[in-house]
Amino acid sequence: MTETRIGYISLEENGLLGGHEAIVPQLLVVMSGEGTVSNDSESLIITEGDAVFWDRGEQHETSSVKGMTAIIIESDSLQPYDLIKKELL
């Protein structure tokens, strides 16, 4: 059985979850607000309902100018293909 961790983050105005490495595959789902996720090469604006996937070892950072809440799911068994497949069903 694979351990799965689910967390909740709340970034206040001008909040920052500083750069760090994903130790396992990770999915961030925006519940409210908006923010920016970035890695070494690009940045992406995310809003309510958006989801972002990071694979093990990827460096990333999350910030918000206006504030944002999100759910984070972490698991060794989390695969992007599984997420796409479930969305299509």
Image (tube, grey):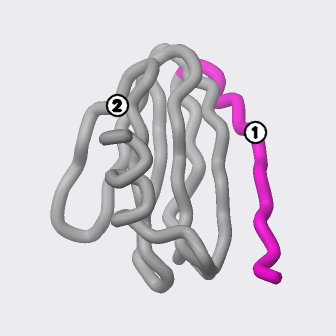
- Of the numbered discs 1 and 2, the one sitting upstream in the chain is 1
Judge whether 75 appears above or below 56 on screen: above
Per the image, label 1 sits on a secondary structure element best described as: strand
The span picked out in magenta is 1-13
Judge by depth and name the residue closer to the eye, 80 or 71.
80
Q: Nearer the viewer, residue 7 or 45?
A: 7
Mark 2 belongs to which amino acid? Ile
Residue identified by numbered label 1: 8
Farthest left residue in view = 41
**Residue 17 forms part of the magenta stretch:** no
Cα separation, mark 1 vs mark 2, equals 16 Å
Relative to 75, 45 lies left or right: left
Q: Residue at x 42, y 40 (%)?
A: 51
| Residue identifier under label 2 | 46
Residue 9 image point, x, y percent: 71, 37
Helix or strand or loop: what does disc 2 sit on? strand
Count of picture labels: 2
Give the x, y percent position of residue 3: 81, 75
Does residue 36 lie above or below 52 as drawn? above
Is 51 left, or right, of 33 in this rendering? left
Secondary structure mostly seen in magenta is strand
